[in-house]
Amino acid sequence: MLLLQKPLPSFTGSLVLLVQHKACKLKNHGRFGSDTKFSGDGYFQKHLKSGRRHFSKSRGPFVSCSLVPSTSELSDARVIYCVAPAMGHNQESHPESNFRVPAIVSALEKMELSPMFRGSEILELHSFSPASVEDIVSVHTKAYVSGLEKSMDQASQKGIIYIDGSGPTYATATTFQESLLAAGAGITLVDSVVAASKSSQDPPMGFALIRPPGHHAIPKGPMGFCVFGNVAIAARYAQRVHGLKRVFIIDFDVHHGNGTNDAFYDDPDIFFLSTHQDGSYPGTGKIDEVGHGSGEGATLNLPLPGGSGDIAMRTVFDEVIVPSAQRFKPDIILVSAGYDGHVLDPLASLQFTTGTYYMLASNIKQLAKDLCGGRCVFFLEGGYNLSSLSYSVADSFRAFLGEPSLASEFDDPAILYEEPSTKVKQAIQKVKHLHSL
Ligand SMILES: *[C@@H]1O[C@H](CO)[C@@H](O)[C@H](O)[C@H]1NC(C)=O
Ligand SMILES: *[C@@H]1O[C@H](CO)[C@@H](O)[C@H](O)[C@H]1NC(C)=O
Ligand SMILES: [Zn+2]
């Protein structure tokens, strides 16, 4: 049985086979047993507001099962990715739209970066399970998870509901299942890169092309377009299931990943390093937020002044990211890959270019190879200009493949202005001083 997603009218790529239902045992994909008791979903109910109807009907739950590729498939692959586009989770004219992942998939096809063109070098995993409730509650409260599941009835009656609090986030009839699927894609990629690293020094890089994004989601609710903390859930999973004790998370989204930051603020074994635009949403992630208790020093926040671009990020990589990771000695690197720092992104005002994202992908791959057997998975977070988003992800794939960047075909240096180099230098000096780098 195949569950097919209807492609969007304007979407010309070959995004048809998204979830394959193999005849295998189904994991618990979100339903709570009737014997499970919760402290109540009061918070969640309080923050539910109904909204206008935008989306009509549930597509029903996604069903699939985890299938880590065979050792021989894994040994040929340079990139391994999953696609979970959450087509039902959408609100008209919302920037975090269901056009985002199809735009990336379509660009990968057009630029001949898909399995169809590359054979075994690029591997798409079609079969992956939604995350289990056990996985989600490693980061979120049971009350939130059950509350969101229960609210799906209301969402399917009303079409869309809003959950307010900080940064209103919407939910539709499919939000719960599609968010479990996004988190499940990340988990399966962790399984795959870990499996590959057992027989190769140079395993494929993982990329979860998923939404809704995750890095703002808080333990008891969604926040800022994010539903479940995909990267945080994968970090806990890597520890619990694979015994990878030390996880290094790099978050280069233009916004501060406050959900991930808080999940591990007092945890010495999960290093969270975030660069973000100073003063942008949600306002957290100040330079002196460095972790707490035994986790002190294992959180590094580097707010960059507006206008910071390629030069700033290259310096940050060499002077901050590399020495932090070297000192931490991770067992795996996970990346909150947000592309909203691109100069063309409508939501912020950094000046990263497609070339900046190529540099990040290439250097992070090398870092993972040097420090943790090459185990590394990227998780899509933000990125709201469909063309800069998809070109940047495609160029990240080229970096993973070790091929030259094609950024110069897309980037227009004429739109860039001078970076605030003095302020950048001050911020870097300050963070190096605070963290003794
Ligand atoms: C960001 O998320 C954290 C994590 O739960 C939460 O404690 C904090 O209040 C959030 N920040 C804002 C500004 O809402
Ligand atoms: C996205 O970038 C393109 C250039 O490739 C530009 O023409 C367009 O206006 C941008 N869109 C948004 C929403 O910023
Ligand atoms: Zn963002």
Image (tube, rainbow, N blue to C red):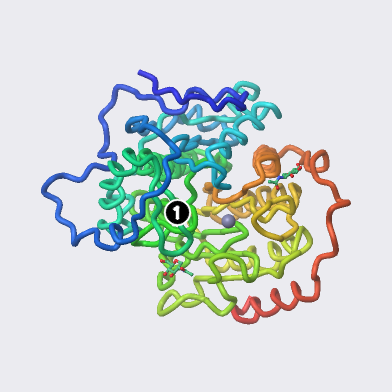
The structure residue drawn at horizontal position 41% and vertical position 59%, both measured from the top left corner, is: 164
Task: Check the image and report above or below for 249 versus 213.
Answer: below
Q: Which of the 4 quarters of the picture holds residue 21?
A: top left
Residue plotted at (77% across, 41% down): 405
- In this view of the protein, which residue sits in the foreground, 235 or 78? 235
Label 1 secondary element: strand
Indicate whether 124 appears above or below 186. Answer: above
Q: Pinpoint residue 90: horizontal percent, then vertical percent.
A: 48, 41
Label 1: how many residues lie within 10 Å, few (<14), some (14-19) or many (20+)? Answer: some
> Residue at (53%, 38%) from the top-left corner?
98
Q: Amino acid at mark 1?
A: Thr
- Most extreme residue toward the top is 1
Hey, which residue is sitting farthest front in the picture? 52
The residue carrying mark 1 has its beta carbon less than 8 Å from ligand 1: no
Give the total of numbered labels. Answer: 1
Q: Is residue 191 visible?
A: no
Ligand 1 shows up in which quadrant of the image?
Answer: bottom left
x%, y% of residue 280?
Answer: 61, 66
Out of 362 and 17, give the one closest to the viewer: 17
Relative image position of residue 293 (x, y in whole percent): 41, 80
Q: Residue 288: x percent and y percent?
A: 56, 80
Q: Is residue 205 left or right of residue 148?
A: right
| Residue position for label 1 | 169
